[in-house]
Each structure stands twice: as C-alpha cells, then as structure tokens.
Amino acid sequence: MPTESTTVGIVGAGPAGLMLSHLLALSGIESVAIDIRSREEIEHTNRAGILEQDSVRLLTDTGVDGRVLTDGYEHHGIELRFGGEGHRINFQELVGASVWLYPQTDVFIDLANARARDGGDVRFGVTNPAVREVTGRPVMSFTDADGVDHEVRCDYLVGSDGSRSMCRHELPESLRRQYYKEYPFAWFGIMVEAPPSAPELIYARHDRGFALISQRTDVLQRMYFQCSPTEDIDAWSDDRIWEELQTRVEGGGFRLIEGPITEKTVLPFRSFVCEPMRHGNLFLAGDAAHTVPPTGAKGLNLALQDVKVLHELLDAAINLGKTELLDTYSTRALERVWKAQQFSYRMTTMLHSLPDETPFDARRQLGQLNDIVSSRFGSAHIAECYTGWPTT
Ligand code: PHB
C-alpha cells in the first residue's frame, strides 16, 4: 500500500475542511483532505444560508472568491413577527453590521473551486476512511475513488467530518464530555419557485408554531415551519403547506407570494457539544464537535470560526515551533461555541411553541418578544449575536 505523508490530514472536505486546507496552503502548510461524499453530492445538499460578516471576510480577504459579494445579498436586518405585526431589528443602525444571504452550497462550491485552482490535495468519494495513532503521528487511511488503498501519515489530524463524526470517537470516552439538548419539534423546509415575499428574513412566532421566511434568489425561496420530529411529509400537500405558512405570518395585510414547491424535507433539530475539541494531535472542527439548532443561523459560521482559530494555531506551531499554543484551541473555540449555543437556544425558545405549553407560557413568550423589540439594548443584543461576535 503506498504510504504518503503530509503535515495536516483533514477528514471531511465540507466547508470547514476545505477552508482549513485553503488557509494552511496560504501559510505554506501541506494538507490532504478526504471525504466519503462526492463533490456533486455535497453540492446538492441544501443547508442554511446566512453568513456573518467575519465569515464573508474570510472568503473574500483570503482570496477564496468574491462571488459572495456579487451573487449574495447583504441584509441590514431581520424581522421578528408576532402578535400579527412585524418588528424590524436594524443591524446597521444598532451595531453597524450586516449579514449575507449566501447558501452553504455556494460557499462549498467556491472553496472546492479555489482548492482545485490552487492545486490543493482534496480526494472526494473515498471509502473505508479510518484514523489511528492520534496521540502520536496520526495515520489517515482510505480507499480512493479509483479503488486504490492509501495510508497518509500526518503530523496533525483534523476531524471536520460532520455531526456523525468518526474522528470524535478517537477521544477516549473517559475524557470526552458530550452535552445534548433535544427539542420536541423539527422544521419542515420547503423550496419554492416564486419571487421573494420580503426583502429580509422573517422569524415569526404564532400560537400554531414558528415560521421562517428566507430567500435564495429572485426566483427561488426557502421557507420553514415548526413541525413534529415525526412529521409525515406525504401528509402535506402544497395547499396545506401554504395555508399553514400564511396563517403563521398573517397580520397587517402581509401575504406570502406562493409558487410551486420543488422540495419538502423535515430537518432534525438539536444542540450538541463535545468537549474537549482536541486530543493529542487530533483536532475537531465544525459539526464534528458541535451542532446548533438552525434558528440562529450559526452552524456554518461556527465551523468557519473554528478553522480560522485552528489555522492560526497550527501556523504558529508548524512555522514558528510554538506547539504549546495548540493547547489553547479547545478553550478558544468553545467560548464562541457556547455563546452560539446560548443564542440559538434563546432564538428557538422565544419563537417556538412547546407541545405542553400553558397559556401563561404563551403570554410570557410574547412579553419576552415585546421586551426585545421595545428596547434598544434588547434589540442591539439580538443584532450583535446574529451578526457575529468580534473575533479576538
Ligand atoms: C436558510 O436560508 O436556509 C436559513 C436562514 C436562516 C436560518 C436558518 C436557515 O436561521
């Protein structure tokens, strides 16, 4: 079996793995990234679409691509909708920041193109991936898309292999702490062929449950509504979906622009954190270490933030010999992870209805939302969390 060697082995070539590979290359550090999925498969997975301004900067300032600025949509705020009325949270006015609507699949395409352009070593469609010796000189083994077996010895190994991470299990159970929060609901997501119903995202709270009106392009829209985790997709005709969505956002004459529904999916919904995010020479990044409910739009942003920090520390360790800095990775990454967990939890609990909710709970929830939109400090805090905390 051919034994290769590289400086950093990366398991998982989604946005986190590819961004890390790209940043390492800029620092003159070699890496090999593998993924069990084909490039086409990743490109056709619909994921969330909001980028914090620091995520946009990471794409544009490091030369991945400027397409986010031309094809993405800058949003200066969001609308919180409840009690039949919309209330705008003006990010620009409150905290001088924006977010960009730019789907994760486009981020992936830009990164994959940039890696191909710069001669990056990325192997999609591998099988039998395995890792070993993570506390020494780790080995990453796999069978490539042509059926050839490989072993790659690395100085460092990064597990950016998603929520069902194989790498995470290399942290011994005695050292691994896992924190879960299950929610008694899920999201029903649809893709719609229609013009946008609103210029910015609408997060709506209704007695029947949450709804989110997002966008994709001038002719394609993304919308979600709270449903049961065991919801039967086939029980939802287009007409029933439109009636439910229209009801959840109604008030002040507002109507969604309807159109043919081209996709229906039920999305899982949970919070998870694995600590620590490092064991020996193995580092976890992105969904491999944490997942957040989609309500705060933080998943991809957190993953990009993890690899930004990890790149900085690997660069210092490899190019300057400051290996002791690697000890700070877990603490530094987790600080932001828990802030994002708190924000996502807060957005979720203030906008969704619980199955066993009492009238008191519902009234208190409206009190909470009113408190936020009538207070400059309350609104500014939402704006600050949504657009992303400054990186230290
Ligand atoms: C999306 O556009 O898919 C989206 C946007 C914001 C969220 C979640 C999903 O909070």
Image: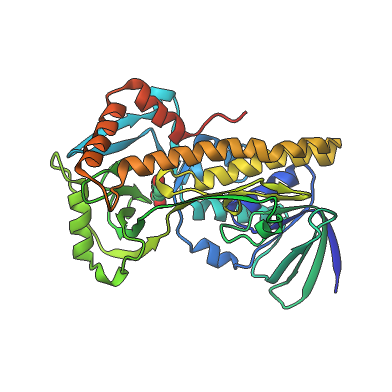
**Please, which residue is most extreme toward the front here?**
174
Q: Is residue 62 visible?
A: no
Is residue 244 shown above or below 362?
Answer: below
Which residue is drawn at the image coordinates 27% and 37% (left, top)?
365
State which quarter of the image contains the N terminus: bottom right
Is residue 56 shown above or below 264?
Answer: above
For the residue pair 14 and 114, the one nearer the viewer reads as: 14
For the residue pair 317 and 14, the one nearer the viewer reads as: 317
Q: Position of residue 143 (x, y in %)?
A: 73, 73
**Please, which residue is most extreme toward the bottom here?**
147
**Horizontal side of residue 277 vs 54, given as left or right:** right
Q: Position of residue 28 (x, y in %)?
A: 80, 44
State which quarter of the image contains the C terminus: top right
Q: Dividing the picture into quarters, in which one does residue 130 lie? A: bottom right
Q: Position of residue 61 (x, y in %)?
A: 61, 36
Which residue is drawn at the image coordinates 21% and 58% (left, top)?
242
Q: Is residue 311 visible?
A: yes
Q: Position of residue 95 (x, y in %)?
A: 43, 24
Q: Dividing the picture into quarters, in which one does residue 41 lie? A: bottom right
